[in-house]
Amino acid sequence: MKYGPVPLREAVGTILAHHVLDHEGRRIFTKGRLLSPSDIETLAALGHTVITAVMLEANDLIENEAARRVGEALCGPGVSLQSPGVGRANLIARVDGPLRVNVDALNRINAIDEGITVATLREHTLVRARQLVTLVKVIPFAVPSAAVADVEAIARDYGPALVVSVRPMRSCSVALIVSAPDCALERLLADFTRPTQARLEKLGSRLDVIVHVPHQPIDIAEAIRAQHAAGRDLLILAGISATMDRDDIIPQAVRAAGGTVSQLGVPVDPGSLLMLAWLDAMPIIGAPGCMKSLQMNVIDLILPRLLAGERLNRADLVLMGHGGLFDDTPDRPMPRREE
């Protein structure tokens, strides 16, 4: 691509680089216009003898075609492509769910050519159908076709999910197991039931059963096994006190039921005392106290991903520290700032 001044008599078939105004300041041509013989006559009548234009070379790909091809290369399951022009391609979510971005591939693609830029929402953002999740913008009027081919090759390297995708959330059956002595049961049920139900309904799932048992490993384990046998997709365990150790009551109960504790403690606040465990393919959340609040906390990070069928492990939770500091809940006993 050659960019620069072109004598008007040689400008047919070139691409206009700047807007053109008439003598009254009204725009008559916009940049990016492919100049025709009649356009040249109009420009000459306005007194132009030279214009700034773009001359394409054999290996150039015009901006709109380049953006479309890059967008198609990135587009994975749960995402559709829109090509509105002006060097843009928009990737739009087709379903509700957590956004998947292959960050390594994205970084490689953005390093290929300064004229090809790809901006996404943060990975694992919960997106809604018809939401813009990725914007491809080709900066100049054309880019080398080899650069676009390199983008396509990188995308192919990363398999069928490609670079950007949205995993749809399932409609899951969830059980809430509340373990507490009788004297505290009514309060805990009131604290945990409403926000748990609200979160699940917002994500397209349902709280099918609430079980209350004594806060003892044998009783909680029996309830876990019963809900697993009933075919629940997810269990949430809410105890009278936060889980502080792998030998605490709730982790003991998970192991007694045949499950495995994947992680106790997450670098997210509020919510650092969360426990994540598994019994076969069923995730078990040991709820931190902040789950009683509808304010953004660790539950809002992991719940959409679990409902989308993702098997989170320790490494996934460790990565949540970056961006894991949220506003504090008003009822915390130890505020972050001194009065």
Image (cartoon, helix red, strand yellow):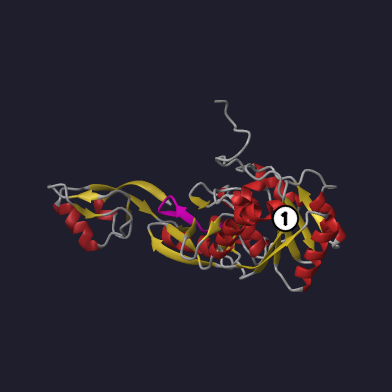
Kindly identify the residue that appears in the image at 79 percent across and 59 percent down.
220
- The crowding category of the residue bearing disc 1, from other C-alpha atoms within 10 Å (few below 14, some 14 to 19, many at least 20), is few
* Residue 58, percent from left and from top: 46, 59
The answer to which image quadrant residue 35 occupies is bottom left
Front residue of 71/15: it is 71
Amino acid type of the residue tagged 1 in the rendering: Asp
Residue 154 at least partly seen: no
- The verdict on residue 279 being magenta is no
Q: Is residue 338 above or below residue 74?
A: above
Q: Nearest the camera: 170 or 270?
A: 270
| Whole-percent x, y for residue 59 in the image | 49, 58
Considering the image in quadrants, where does the C terminus appear? top right
Q: For the point 84% across and 56% down, which residue is it?
A: 217
Left/right placement of residue 175 relative to residue 135 reads right
Residue carrying label 1: 182
Q: How many marks?
A: 1
Please provide percent x and percent y for residue 92.
48, 63
Q: Which residues are magenta?
A: 135-146
Residue 139 is one of the magenta-drawn residues? yes
